[in-house]
Amino acid sequence: MRLLVVNPNTTQSMTEKIGEAARAAALPSTEIVAVNPDAGPPSIEGYYDEVFAIPGLIGEMRRAGPVDGTIIACFDDTGLEAARSFSAAPVIGIGEAAFHMASLIAGKFSVVTTLSRSVPAIEHNLVRYGLASRCARVRAADVAVLELEIPGSAARGRISREIDRAIQEDAAEAIVLGCAGMADLAAALGREHGLPVIDGVAAAVKLAEALVGLGLRTSKLGGYAAPLSKRYTGEFLRFSP
Ligand code: 5HY
């Protein structure tokens, strides 16, 4: 099968990291195509960045052509509903994937994300997905997204300390890493802290493989129905359904 993994921000080094994490999790027979848009925010930190990342996300999906599944490699699950409306193949957000995986192995989990401004969107998603009751707390490690791309930065230490707090204060039984840019940290942090630490990229790859393996595709009977044909104007003309 062929899975498209879209990093909706424009930071190539993060896309490469995401692609490596996806390939490490994927079956040998699964082809991973990791991409990011040229235009848009270099990092998504809050609602305003998120909205300007969505055209680029849809543009990469249009450019990729036929795929068996798409993974949105941004922990806010940026543009998830629009992407599911656009594509008949399954579309998985790494946030939703990680929440579901955590709920299968822990009574309750905590999320450790980047900045506090990113917390409300994640809390909102947990409610929308029906998993808020399984999440003890969404925490911010006070790490800017692009700090994760700087070798030797203090980011890993701050994330590790926030995991300690989640274990001590939340009684968290598992940790979900709340940024695609943390994908390379999950295994080591799990060993360091002695509990499951989940990376949403790997979780999304395995869920996509499961859906494709079962022959399940996005239902087009409701909100994910294909967009109605109409002519968009101006710079969005090329997105006309
Ligand atoms: C992400 N932002 O996974 C989110 C994380 C966040 O550019 N990639 C980003 O902080 O919301």
Image (cartoon, helix red, strand yellow):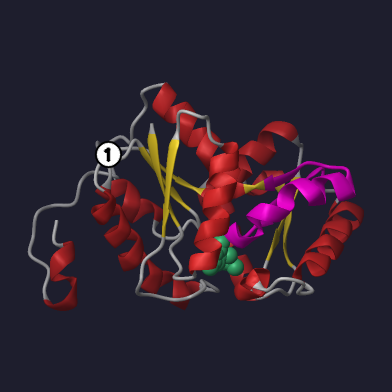
Q: Residue at x 67, y 74 (%)?
A: 150
Q: Secondary structure at mark 1?
A: loop
Q: Residue at x 54, y 42 (%)?
A: 23
Q: Quadrant of residue 238?
A: bottom left
Crowdedness of circle 1 by 10 Å Cα count: few (<14), some, many (20+)? many
Outermost right residue = 168
The x, y position of residue 138, in whole percent, is 70, 60
Report the side of 85 relative to 48 (left or right).
left
Range covered by the magenta-colored residues: 173-198
The x, y position of residue 183, in whole percent, is 64, 53
The x, y position of residue 12, in whole percent, is 48, 67
Q: Confirm whether residue 127 shows in the render.
A: no
Q: Which of 191 and 109 lies nearest the eye of the viewer?
A: 191
Outermost top residue = 214
Say what amino acid the circle numbered 1 marks.
Answer: Ala
- Residue topped by disc 1: 88
Report the side of 232 relative to 92 (left or right).
left
Ligand 1 visible in quadrant: bottom right
Q: Is 238 situated above or below 92?
A: below
Q: Confirm whether residue 205 shows in the render.
A: yes
Q: Is 67 situated above or below 227?
A: above
Q: Quadrant of residue 41?
A: bottom left
In the image, residue 195 lies in the stretch drawn in magenta: yes
Report the side of 231 relative to 161 (left or right).
left
Q: Residue at x 31, y 58 (%)?
A: 60
Q: Quadrant of residue 213?
A: top left
In the image, residue 63 lies in the stretch drawn in magenta: no
Quadrant of the frame with the C terminus = bottom left
The x, y position of residue 1, in whole percent, is 38, 31
Q: Residue at x 52, y 73 (%)?
A: 43
